Amino acid sequence: MAGKPGRPNTNSTKRKGSGAYRGARWHTAGEVRALFSGLPVRKLTLRSAIFLSSATRWARWLEQGVLSVLPWGGLLLATGEKA
């Protein structure tokens, strides 16, 4: 999971969060790329989603216009090809 906007990720190995996010691991895009370094993966791509968790009609409409390549969402998805 990506770090929350405006909230520094001081220790990515610690589990943080509260409520539904309790125990979640928060990683920046750079940390996710580092997890794949040295592995047989090529064309690593990161996409982000869940910018507004309210799931209201307004939030869904707004999220359609936000670029998924911006690492600001609450979910960070990594995809790649086996090298």
Image (cartoon, rainbow, N blue to C red):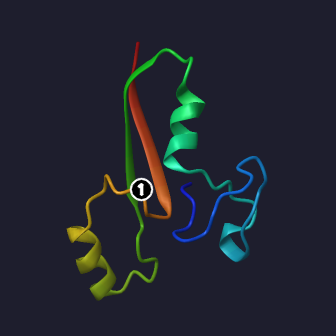
Residue drawn at x 49%, y 14% as measured from the top left:
40
In the image, 27 versus 9, the foreground residue is 9
When the figure is inspected, residue 68 is found, relative to residue 34, above or below; the finding is: below
- The residue depicted at 55 percent of the width and 18 percent of the height is 39
Q: Name the image quarter holding residue 72.
A: bottom left
In the depicted structure, whether residue 29 falls above or below residue 24:
above
Secondary structure, mark 1, is: loop
Q: Is residue 48 above or below residue 37?
A: below
- Position of 68 relative to 59 (above/below): above
Give the residue type at disc 1: Pro
Residue found at x 67% / y 68%: 21
Residue 9: name its quadrant.
bottom right
From the image, tell me which residue sits under label 1. Answer: 71
Determine the residue positioned at 44% across, 83% down: 54
Place of residue 12 in the rendered image (x, y in percent of width and height, measured from the top left): 70, 50
Residue nearest the observer in this picture, 45 or 28: 28
Q: Is residue 4 left or right of residue 71?
A: right
Total marks placed: 1
Residue 76: percent from left, percent from top: 47, 52
Few, some or many residues within 10 Å of mark 1 (<14, 14–19, 20+): many
Looking at the picture, how far across and down is residue 43, in whole percent? 34, 26
Rendering coords of residue 42 (x, y %):
38, 20
On screen, residue 33 versus residue 58, left or right, reads right
